[in-house]
């Protein structure tokens, strides 16, 4: 069983002999705990590893990072010892952008790539998003606007102490997202599946379909009932889809 000693990586349920590692990148204001319980609904052949950004959960004392390039470099270094088996990336919202840029970095500088890239709840990087920059707003206005755009789960909005706890990380993540500047480059060689909620007003279907331009390999769009956090509303269906797609990817390598 693999031990994960890096603060950047959290594995809540190590597998004895995984045939694939699924690295999952959390949304803005979130943490690696969003993958808790996934192991109970995924086959034992898939080991889920959450990417933990600084400034949250057990890393709350670590300063937040608002520079995309710095984050990508650090995450790539942390992952390197654990790429001795096939791996896939799943990123939701902010995590979709980070997983995409990390894939680019790995292809360009490490000559490795995920067997599949799942980008969720995020417009294609070459397209302009609907949500405007919000990180500069005062706390009350910031929370109101983030909530209006579906960027906070209802139970978080109703919990004042929890809101105060996640507010610094949420603001830093919105700043990180707003500072991101897409640089055109050749499409990725790995398959991409773009995912989203049918009722997510912040990421319309045409913005999701734009991910097609980012791969020279297979491309698919998968939508689910629900809003921006469809992956919580329809977790079982979403994880079943991930499991089947990852299993096909591994079989295709045999």
Image (spheres, grey):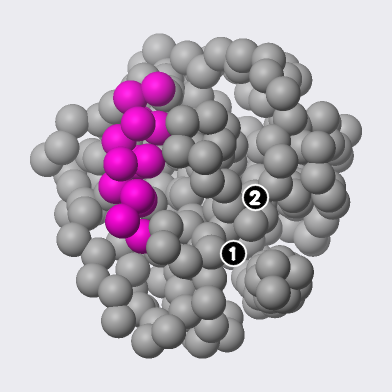
Judging by the rendered image, the residue that carries numbered circle 2 is: 117
Task: Find residue 79 and report its horizontal and vertical position in percent.
Answer: 35, 51
Instruction: Give the magenta range.
Output: 69-82
Is 51 drawn above or below residue 235 in the view shown? Answer: above
Judging by the rendered image, the residue that carries numbered circle 1 is: 232
For the stretch drawn in magenta, what is the main secondary structure? helix
Q: Are marks 1 and 2 in contact (CB under 8 Å)?
A: no
Left or right of residue 81: residue 128: right
Quadrant in which the C terminus appears: bottom right
Q: How many marks?
A: 2
Task: Find residue 6 and report its horizontal and vertical position in percent.
Answer: 21, 54
Does residue 98 appear in this view?
no
Secondary-structure class at tag 1: helix
Task: Find residue 237 and report its horizontal and vertical position in percent.
Answer: 72, 74
Task: Find residue 73 and report its horizontal and vertical position in percent.
Answer: 35, 31
Secondary-structure class at tag 2: strand
Circle 2 packing at 10 Å, graded few (<14), some (14-19), many (20+), is many
Left or right of residue 214: residue 122: left
Query: As drawn, which residue projects farthest toward the left?
Result: 61
Is 110 drawn above or below residue 195 in the view shown? Answer: above
Residue 213 tag number: none
Q: Which residue is at a point 67% across and 19% down the rendered structure image?
A: 185
Of badges 1 and 2, nearer the viewer stands 2
Sequence-earlier tag: 1 or 2: 2
Q: Which residue is at a point 57% across and 47% down the rendered structure image?
A: 113
């Amino acid at each position: 069983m693999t031990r994960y000693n890096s603060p950047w990586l959290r594995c809540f349920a190590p597998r004895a002999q995984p045939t694939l590692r699924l690295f999952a990148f959390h949304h803005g204001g979130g943490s690696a705990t969003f993958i808790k319980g996934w192991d109970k609904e995924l086959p034992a052949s898939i080991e889920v590893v959450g990417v933990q950004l600084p400034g949250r959960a057990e890393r709350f004392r670590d300063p937040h990072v608002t520079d995309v390039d710095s984050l990508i470099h650090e995450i790539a270094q942390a992952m390197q010892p654990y790429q001795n088996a096939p791996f896939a990336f799943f990123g939701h919202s902010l995590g979709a952008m980070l997983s995409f840029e990390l894939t680019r970095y790995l292809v360009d500088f490490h000559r490795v790539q995920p067997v599949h890239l799942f980008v969720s709840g995020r417009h294609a990087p070459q397209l302009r998003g609907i949500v405007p920059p919000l990180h500069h707003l005062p706390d009350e206005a910031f929370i109101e606007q983030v909530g209006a755009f579906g960027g906070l789960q209802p139970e978080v909005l109703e919990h004042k102490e929890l809101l105060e706890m996640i507010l610094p990380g949420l603001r830093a993540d919105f700043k990180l997202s707003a500072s991101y500047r897409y640089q055109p480059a050749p499409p990725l060689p790995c398959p991409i599946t773009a995912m989203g909620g049918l009722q997510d007003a912040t990421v319309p279907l045409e913005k999701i379909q734009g991910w097609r331009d980012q791969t020279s390999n297979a491309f698919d769009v998968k939508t689910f009932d629900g809003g921006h956090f469809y992956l919580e509303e329809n977790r079982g269906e979403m994880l079943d889809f991930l499991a089947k797609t990852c299993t096909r990817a591994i079989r295709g390598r045999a």
